[in-house]
Amino acid sequence: MSIPRLAAVAVIFLLTSSFLRAEETCGDLTGQADQTRYELRNVSQHRSPIQIDGYLTLRDDPATNVRVYRVHASARNVSKKKISYWSVGFDGNGSSGPSLNLIQSNDYFFTGDVFAPGETVKMTPCPIRLVLRTAKSPAETGDSTALTASARVEFVQFSDGTIWGDRDTAAKVQLDRSETLRSKIESLRKIYSEQGERAFMDALAEPTAFSCLERIKSLCRNENANSSCARKAIQQLLATAAQQHNLEAN
């Protein structure tokens, strides 16, 4: 996958933990010492359209009381269909410290792109920092080497509208897309129509969880107060979404 394509992918990281604090930070940890490597075991359901390979690294830092996880994986489309949405879960369980539960979702709905048959993409999300639990006794310290690392394909939607995986996830994906269009994109168009260019640019600058909008900000960063770039990009986004919706409906 090319760099522009990667930039267009809507990537969502969902991190869950029952411990005190979870923090995600980007940085190159390849040179860090005391990292332990665990090969990923693929636990996807039978006939998964995506093959996952790779490994998980773990490093405990007692000085800062954190455990640092990092995923190094690749995904290959082993089906004969183009994929418009896919999500993969990564787990690190069984050691004495905080476990990892990470879901990476990739949605091409607003970009018109696809994950093509036979294509392989790398998945190297930012390192995940989790607070280490303070051990009350030596028996609770445990051994981090007991950790098991696994990856599973959660859900896949093909470009023809068919799906593989949980139908509840399919409904949530559609809801998220509708929410993106309804609550944010359409509201931006209304602000421009009713309040003008300056209000539109101020609203667009507000932080958002929608990567498609963050991409528009990046593409139009040098336009300053001129809204034409952003408005054209939003219009193209809506056109692409409508085309994708028509494909799914057929």
Image (spheres, helix red, strand yellow):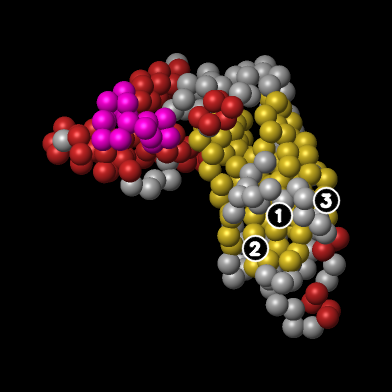
Label for residue 130?
Answer: 2
List x then y, in percent, for residue 161. Answer: 51, 23
Q: Amino acid at mark 1?
A: Tyr
Q: Residue at x 81, y 57 (%)?
A: 33
Using the image, determine if residue 16 lies above or below residue 240.
below
Crowding around mark 1 (Cα neighbors within 10 Å: few <14, some 14 to 19, many 20+) is many
Residue on which disc 3 sits: 37
Q: Earlier in the sequence, mark 1 or mark 2?
A: 1
Q: Amino acid at mark 3?
A: Arg
List x then y, in percent, for residue 213. Answer: 39, 36
Residue on which disc 1 sits: 69
Identify the secondary structure beneath mark 2.
strand
Which image quarter: residue 84?
top right
Q: How many marks?
A: 3
Res 79 visible: no
Asked if disc 1 and disc 2 are in contact, CB closer than 8 Å, the reply is: yes
Which image quarter: residue 175?
top left
Q: Residue furthest left?
A: 194
Q: Quadrant of the C terminus?
A: top left
List x then y, in percent, for residue 129. Answer: 64, 59
Q: Amino acid at mark 2?
A: Leu
Q: Quadrant of the N terminus?
A: top right
- What's the CA distance linking mark 3 and mark 1? 10 Å
Left or right: 122 in relation to 40: left
